[in-house]
Image (spheres, helix red, strand yellow):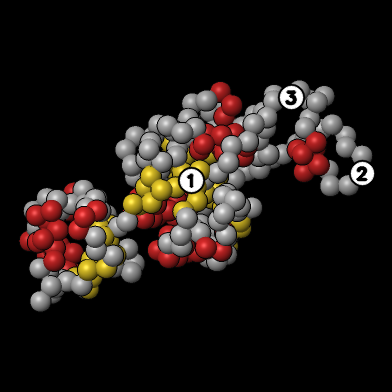
Amino acid sequence: SVVPFKNYQSSNYKGNYQLKVKSLEAVSSLFDRIPGLKEKCSDPTSSLKIFCEGVSKKESVDLIQQDDLLDFIDQMKTIVANTIAKITGKRFTKRSVPWNLDRLNQHRGVLDQSFHDNADVDVYILGSGIKADHSEFENRAVNGFSSVGDHTDCEGSGTELASLVGGRTMGVARSARLVGVKVINCDGTTDSASVIRGISYIEESILKSDRRAVVLVGFTIHAIDKDINSKLVSLTELNYGSNSGVLVVAGAGDDDDLDSCHSTPASAQGGTAL
């Protein structure tokens, strides 16, 4: 017998797979049987899933034969991710604070042309990456992780989102530490495995740092991806140190014809779609 295949499309071979192993012991046996596969795969998750990238056709044929070790093989589909609509703004001085920041700082009464924040929080920007050395970030930004090559923000959208969060000019949290997590290729595409690896990095990083955290997702998938949604939900339920739950923010109305209830990540339960 052979391992059940989910979402198999032989004409759209990309070499990216999600494997469900029968046990932790099966992992080492699988890598022993297929030399070179281990270097292409992640460590198993708590639900015994492994994500592999760049698997050759020969290796995929070998995988199908491992029915004693695997419950199923899922060929990861390619996702075209639309980045959040761009927002522009002008530089301002203390005497010309934009009304939106002024109102955030002062909920009632006449605006006083001042804005203050002391947000001691880590903000993870999940998307196209960020230009961490940009002067707007004043040495508070780092490139945390990339599942799709180097950290270059080819589209600029991740850097722009980071500037709205913590840039010195238009940022609402100018003391925040910004962490770039790149999961979008320079051609604007990605796949479920790449996104999930990025979210896994965020979860591990939050647990290690024990600091308050926010996750801003900078892309929209024009379909519901249950695996990605489930991983995001796990962040909203994460207990770390004295903190309970991570705020996950996603874009809503990112496309005139797209219902947020039918897209990822806006449809993820527990998150905030704006």
Image position, residue 80 (x, y; %)? 41, 48
- Residue marked by disc 1: 82
The image shows residue 255, relative to residue 178, as above or below, that is below
- Residue under the point 45% across and 39% down: 128
Quadrant (top left/top right/bottom left/bottom right) for the N terminus:
bottom left
**The residue under label 2 is which amino acid type?**
Gly
Label 3: few (<14), some (14–19) or many (≥20) C-alpha neighbours in 10 Å: few
- Determine the residue located farthest toward the right in the rendered image: 109
Q: Is residue 195 visible?
A: yes
- Residue under the point 46% across and 53% down: 221
**The residue under label 1 is which amino acid type?**
Asn
Q: Is residue 90 left or right of residue 217?
A: right
Q: CA distance from mark 1 to mark 3?
A: 30 Å
The image shows residue 181, relative to residue 246, as above or below, that is above
Q: Which one is in front in this view, the residue at disc 2 or the one at disc 1?
A: 1
Label 2: few (<14), some (14–19) or many (≥20) C-alpha neighbours in 10 Å: few
**The residue under label 3 is which amino acid type?**
Phe
Q: Which one is in front in this view, the residue at disc 1 or the one at disc 3?
A: 1
Q: CA distance from mark 2 to mark 1?
A: 39 Å
Image position, residue 196 (x, y; %)? 38, 55
Q: Is residue 19 visible?
A: no
Q: Is residue 201 left or right of residue 92?
A: left
| Residue 17 position by quadrant | bottom left
Q: CA distance from mark 2 to mark 3?
A: 22 Å
Q: Nearer the viewer, residue 74 or 171?
A: 74
- Residue marked by disc 3: 92
| Residue 61 position by quadrant | bottom left
Q: Earlier in the sequence, mark 1 or mark 3?
A: 1
- Residue marked by disc 2: 109
Q: Earlier in the sequence, mark 2 or mark 3?
A: 3
- Residue under the point 49% across and 32% down: 156
Q: Is residue 127 left or right of residue 123?
A: left
